[in-house]
Amino acid sequence: MAIRIGDEAPDFTAETTEGSVRFHEWIGDKWAILFSHPKDFTPVCTTELGYMARLKPEFDRRNTKIIGISVDPVGDHQRWVADIKETQGYAVNYPMIGDGDLQVAKLYDMLPANTAGGKRTAVDNATVRSVFVIGPDKKVKAMIVYPMSTGRNFDEVLRLLDSVQLTAKHTVATPVNWQPGQDVIIPTSVSDEDARKKYPQGFKTHKPYLRTVQQPK
């Protein structure tokens, strides 16, 4: 079943490098980033896992948990993390889900429901290259999918997270290439009258449908 923005993130129980987790319970009242990998000991994913370890303090600061998943057992993950630390300079400091039976990959529509397990290559699992941003309400807020040959931009994932957290709290939208602290957009669902009440400091009208205002604190 396809997953769309606004859907409840499928719950599951799985073994990870930090023990068994029940996903919704593990998220608790925080935000979460679930990011997937087609196979352990693959080059692009090795660089990604190391960079996510480096960025973890930034996600912590945003009240966000991060968790990886690869279509391999936990034992393989535990051997892989040594390579990641050696080559990337950062030890994996978040759980990695073992998904050897493809349960989670299928739940999140990264592989067809009728996909068989067994010995699989990274190419067999090429579509297991997704990022899911999940809110404290356990709803999917955003998704990004990459091909195997392209390393993900996790700085962009941080920017995306900043945007969805801001827009979840305030009735605003963020423009192209927005960075935290820059002006934001007043949605068309907010009338000029309501906008004047909400933003007594004023806002700028570029077109009737395009109004910008200083980012709310």
Image (tube, helix red, strand yellow):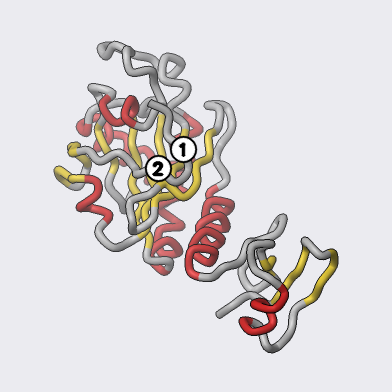
Q: Residues within 10 Å of mark 1 (few under 14, many from 20)?
A: some
Q: Is residue 145 left or right of residue 214?
A: left
Q: Which residue type carries mark 1?
A: Arg
Residue in the image at 46% along x and 57% along y: 55
> For the residue labelled by badge 2, is the local secondary structure a helix, a strand or a loop?
loop
| Up-down relation of residue 122 to residue 85 (above or below) | above
Question: Badges 1 and 2: C-beta atoms under 8 Å apart?
Answer: yes
Residue 4: mark in rendering: 1
Q: Which residue type carries mark 2?
A: Asp
Seen as rendered, the residue at the extreme right is 206
Q: Is residue 123 left or right of residue 107?
A: right
Residue 7: mark in rendering: 2
Which x, y percent locates residue 171? 57, 68
The quarter of the rendered structure image containing the C terminus is: bottom right
Residue in the image at 29% along x and 31% along y: 104
Residue in the image at 46% along x and 16% along y: 123
The quarter of the rendered structure image containing the N terminus is: top left
Q: Residues within 10 Å of mark 2 (few under 14, many from 20)?
A: few
